[in-house]
Image: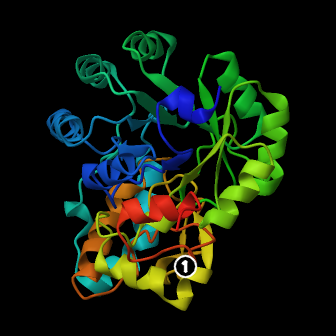
Amino acid sequence: MTLQDLLGTELPIIQAPMAGVQGSELALAVSNAGGLGSLPCAMLGPEALRSELEALQAGTDRPFSVNFFAHTPPVPSGAREKAWREALSPYYREFGIDPQAIPAGAGRTPFNAEAAALLEEFRPAVVSFHFGLPDDRLLKRVKTAGAKVLSTATTVEEALWLEQRGVDAIIAQGLEAGGHRGIFLTRDMSTQMGTLALLPQVVAAVTVPVIAAGGIADARGVRAAMALGAAGVQVGTAFLLCPEATTRPIHREALKGPQARHTAITNLFSGGPARGIMNRVMRELGPVAEVAPEFPLATSAIAPLRSAAEAKGLGDFTPLWSGQNASGCREIPAGQLVRALAGEP
């Protein structure tokens, strides 16, 4: 069975779910072009999620995917939050921000019973997860609703863990990929491999289809992944300049300039390891700060700095998510990009 047979798509091209830079419009454009469009749901409340699901159902009769985080929320530490805000205090002073007025909060919710109920109502063809899988009871509800289940692995061990729990396909996420790492069995970043190293090892270790992700920006990259045994590819960064994406102007300009060639894994924006274009705060604090609270608790303290800097036209505190290969970013409709990735003229 091909990935297209499994997912019901025309092409083995999946658009990566990218919270903060897209909504249903991008997912619809990809699905209607024959790929699998994906909607990021981790930052959507119940009403927003319902609205987006209604838009997806109204906008296509083709399969689409909805993506959720499956992390275990950490126990907040007052001491660590205090230390994090102290590390950011010079910036608060620079922008005239009162740190005492900043509320604590996660900003990202893991998959829960309320989301499961919405999926039972709307019955999307595909549900994907990041950071492992939800508990067995919730996962059973997703499968009973008829969805194919995908999840991300960043190591062979994670791929085996996912297969043992019944996923229908595995996304092998190489270290080149932009945005949050799907790492979940360890916090040891030395376990992380590039796509061309990880992909064939995962393919050899599991029996379910494997989808390559990370560093794939054009049809040549798609062919290379398929030659190494991938059943399909997941592409994110290349879609960021498409008109259907909601990528902010500051982010778009960074992707189009030479600075996009310098990315790093950072935990400054959420507490979890994620790849983005180097900017001021990453240079000055270092991309990884031990003082930052665990994912996703670091978000609330840095968010006001992002807003204040962006109001001045600066991306100094903005998570400029990007993979290591932004060469495929093109200001063309997403459907056209899907066809180009598939090697069509």
Q: x, y percentage for residue 244?
A: 29, 63
Does 1 appear above or below 88?
above
Q: In front here: 307 or 326?
A: 326
Looking at the image, the residue that sits furthest to the front is 345
Horizontal relation, residue 158 to residue 52: left or right: right
Quarter of the image containing the N terminus?
top right
**Colouring mode (rainbow / by chain / secondary structure / one colour):** rainbow
Q: Which residue is mark 1?
A: 278
Horizontal relation, residue 51 to residue 162: left or right: left
Q: Quadrant of residue 141?
A: top left
Q: How many marks?
A: 1
Does 270 appear above or below 201?
below
Residue at the spot 47% in from the left edge and 79% down from the top edge: 255
| Observer able to see residue 150 | no
Q: Residues within 10 Å of mark 1 (few under 14, many from 20)?
A: many
Q: x, y percentage for residue 124?
A: 34, 27
Horizontal relation, residue 88 to residue 211: left or right: left
Q: In front here: 13 or 168?
A: 13
Q: Amino acid at mark 1?
A: Met
Q: x, y percentage for residue 310?
A: 27, 80
Q: Quadrant of residue 20?
A: bottom left
| Observer able to see residue 111 | yes
Residue at the spot 50% in from the left edge and 47% down from the top edge: 14
Q: x, y percentage for residue 253?
A: 39, 85
Q: In front here: 146 or 3?
A: 3
Does 274 appear above or below 229?
below
Secondary element at image label 1: loop
Horizontal relation, residue 319 to residue 222: left or right: left
